[in-house]
Amino acid sequence: MASLGDLERSVMDLLWDSAEPLTANDLRDDLAALGTDAKELAVTTVLTVLARLEKKGLVIRERTTRPHRYTASSTREDHTVGLLNDALGTAQDREAVLARFIGGISADEAASLRAILDTVKSA
Amino acid sequence: MASLGDLERSVMDLLWDSAEPLTANDLRDDLAALGTDAKELAVTTVLTVLARLEKKGLVIRERTTRPHRYTASSTREDHTVGLLNDALGTAQDREAVLARFIGGISADEAASLRAILDTVKSA
DNA sequence: GAGCTCTTTTACGGTACGTAGAAATATTGG
DNA sequence: CCAATATTTCTACGTACCGTAAAAGAGCTC
C-alpha cells in the first residue's frame, strides 16, 4: 500500500474530515488555515498532490463538475486497516505480533477489544 | 519509524532469523542463497545497507571484533508492533480502526485474540 | 612492508514527494 | 463571440531515500 508524504497526508486528512467533496481551492485554503503556518501553497501544488493521490487510488476525482471535486475513496479507518494489514504482512508471526501488541495497549483498550470481539463472535 | 527498502528488509529478515550475529560476508552469502537469484551482491553493498540500518537503529554493530558482527536491535515481532502503532497513530479513532480490523480477521484469529486478551486480562 | 581483508568514503541512477511556473484549456462577463 | 479569468495539465527542480558498487583507506599477517 502507498505510504503518504506530509502534504499528501494533510490533504487526505482534510478529505477524510469533510462530508462534502472538496476542490483544490478549498483544500489550499483549508491547508493554509491549519497550524497557523500562514504558508499559502500554490493551487497547482495542491492539484499535483491530488493527481498523485488519485493515481494511488486514495481519492476520487469528479471530472464532470468544472472545478473538479475530490473525495477520499475510503474512510480513514479503512485506510488505516489496510496499513495495519500491510504491517502485519501475511507472515506466520501474526499471532506473536498481536500478542505483543495487546501487551502494550491500555486496560481500557483491552476492554474495548474484548467487547468488539464479542460483537463479531459469530464470524 | 523507518520503513525499509527491499534489500534492507531482506537483511533484517536474515538477522532476525539468525541466533548468532552475522558479518557482512555471511549476509552476502545468505542473500545469494535466497530465491535462486544467483545474484551475488558486492560486499560493500551489504555494508552500506548495514550502515544505514545501524543509523536507523535497527541493527547493532560490534566494532570490537574485526569482521564486524551485526545483530538486529529488536525482534521482528517488536519491530512489527512498532509499525502497527505507527499505523494506528495516536488518534482517537484507534478503536474504530481496531473494530474494522477485527471484523476482517478469521474466526481462528479472533479466537486466538480472545485467548491472548484473557492471558493479559490483569493488565 | 607487501599483500590480503575489511571498512569508510564517495558516487551514480532511480523513485517519491514538495513545490510551482508555463502552457493549455475551459468558463464567463460583456 | 471574444477577451479576461479560472482551472487543469505539463514540465521541472530540489531533496531525500535506496540499491548498487568502485575507490580509497586501515589493519592484520607473513
Image (spheres, coloured by chain):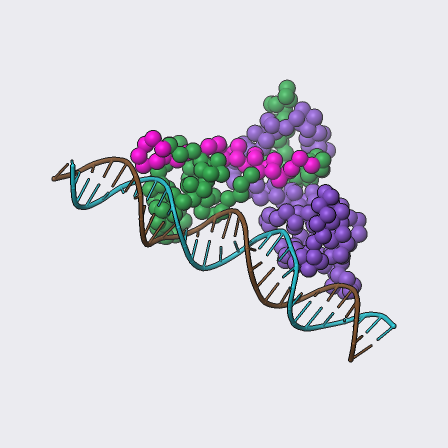
Chain colours: A green, B purple, C brown, D cyan
Is A55 placed above or below B22 here?
above
The answer to whether residue A11 is seen in the rendering is: no
Q: Which quadrant does the C terminus of chain A fall into?
A: top right
Left or right of residue D5: residue A123: right
Q: Front-most of A2 and A37?
A: A2
Residue A15 belongs to magenta span: no
Q: Is residue A84 visible?
A: yes
Count of residue discs: 0
Position of the N terminus of chain A by quadrant: top right
Residue lying at 44% horizontally and 35% vertically, measured from the top left: A59
Tell me which residue sits at (68%, 30%) in the image: B113
Residue B30 drawn at (x, y percent): 76, 49
Q: Quadrant of residue C12?
A: bottom right
Residue B57, position as x, y percentages in the image = 65, 55
A69 over C23 or under it: above or below: above
State the image coordinates of residue B117 (x, y, percent, origin top left). 68, 32
Residue visible at 31% across and 34% down in the picture: A66
A23 displayed left or right of A7: left
Front-most of residues A5 and A106: A5
Instruction: Give the magenta part as a residue range.
Output: A63-91
Please name the residue shown 60% across and 23% down the image. Answer: A119
